[in-house]
Amino acid sequence: MFSDKDRAHFSNLETPFYYYDLNLLQSTLTACKKAASAYQFHVHYAMKANFNPKVLAKIKDTGFGADCVSGGEVKKAIEVGFVKEKVVFAGVGKSDREINDALDQDIFCFNVESIQELQVINELAEKKQKKAKVAIRINPNVDAHTHANITTGLDENKFGINSWDMPACANILNISANLEFVGIHFHIGSQITNLDVYKNLCTRVNEFATWFEDHGFKVSILNVGGGLGIDYYHPDQQIPDFEAYFKIFADFLEVKPYQEVHFELGRALVGQSASLISRVLYVKNGKKKNFIVLDAGMTELMRPALYQAYHKIENISQQLAVGGVQSPNLIKYDVVGPICESTDCFGKEVELPESFRNDLIAIRSAGAYGEVMASHYNLRETIATVTNEDL
Ligand code: LLP
């Protein structure tokens, strides 16, 4: 929730803007670190979720590594001070230039997503007379039971190497002098709220680890990816249950004494710590529908348009006017943005206090895949970010 002081400050600022609660971010990071440390688990932050410099600085200071998905992210991770030994580079389409740059940076490892990519990394490493550390990203065909667009671990998904290609993979690893196999990697999807799916993942990880060891490879790293979801319906219950999450892996993974378990969390670390703050431009009351037209749109937060994702919407001006209690006069509105697309809608039939031009609207849980997925469609400008430390 926002304090009266926050809301008073917001009313003086130009909208829309992203508001970050860095104290909440810190508490979330501390909770995650504590829960992971109980089992000596290692966490790499999935940078794609949010690469705001202030957010990255806090995460780096926690001691987490960085999970990168492009040359740009590898570069940024190193620039902001993540230690190279904790930088991993995943992604289904790494270009030669990106691979070369990552080899030059001596990052910890490449999570390799195809047999051809293994061959290319070997060739490029050979030219540099280097040995590239590689983990094999395996597509385990485990259903994450999340939105189809953010499911990544099924046979029909483009990610990872399929199980039937493991013998070919082992063969390439055996004949490639410039590759050093370090382990296996998985990531089955995002916004996972049914933790039982991770039990199925553990079963598959155990099977593949055994397969590689039976074929003469030492599996030092078990990287189980990320995906832990957040509660978009209750943004004030802010810190995900990291203890329950890590316990599943502690209970179901078969970890040998020389093996490290790595996680790549994005959303769970940053999701609840930001809101998109916007202003009501117009209210249109119709016969069938009432619309609130905001000055923020899908260009600032794309998730509702792209995945019909739910984000809680609050009218913070009306809360302020009645001392923090919602006005009893509730009306159903479609809350839309200014972009020339019908999908530019943050929520349909959203029950809100009667709203007026210039009211401030908060779209909650926007810290993950919010600011980073913004676009300049309609020649929209990049919006400001404000933190609690700026107020
Ligand atoms: N590791 C890999 C290999 C990934 O592809 C991802 C996310 C993660 C880790 C981090 O997943 P997380 O812990 O954040 O769930 N734009 C979508 C989400 C796309 C996720 C892509 N991969 C959304 O807004 O819901």
Image (cartoon, rainbow, N blue to C red):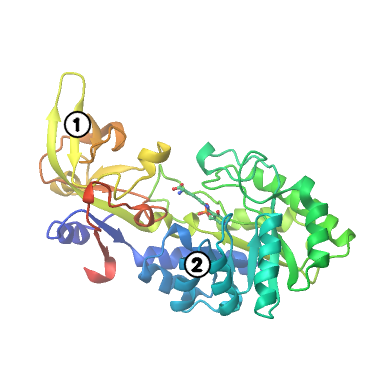
Q: Amino acid at mark 2?
A: Gly
Q: Amino acid at mark 1?
A: Phe
Residue drawn at point x = 59 percent, y = 54 percent:
92
Please name whichever residue, 85 or 330, is drawn nearer the observer in this view of the structure: 85
Identify whether 143 is placed above or below 269. Answer: above
Identify whether 278 is placed above or below 58. Answer: above
Mark carried by residue 291? 1
Question: Around disc 1, counting alpha carbons within 10 Å, would you say few (fewer than 14), some (14 to 19), or many (20 or more)?
Answer: many
Residue drawn at point x = 83 percent, y = 53 percent:
167
Circle 2: element type: helix
The quadrant holding residue 99 is bottom right
Identify whether 96 is placed above or below 105. Answer: above
Query: Residue 370: where, in percent of width, then height?
Result: 37, 53
Mark carried by residue 14? none
Residue drawn at point x = 83 percent, y = 59 percent:
171
The reply to whether residue 203 is visible in this rendering is no
Please name whichever residue, 297 or 172, is drawn nearer the observer in this view of the structure: 172
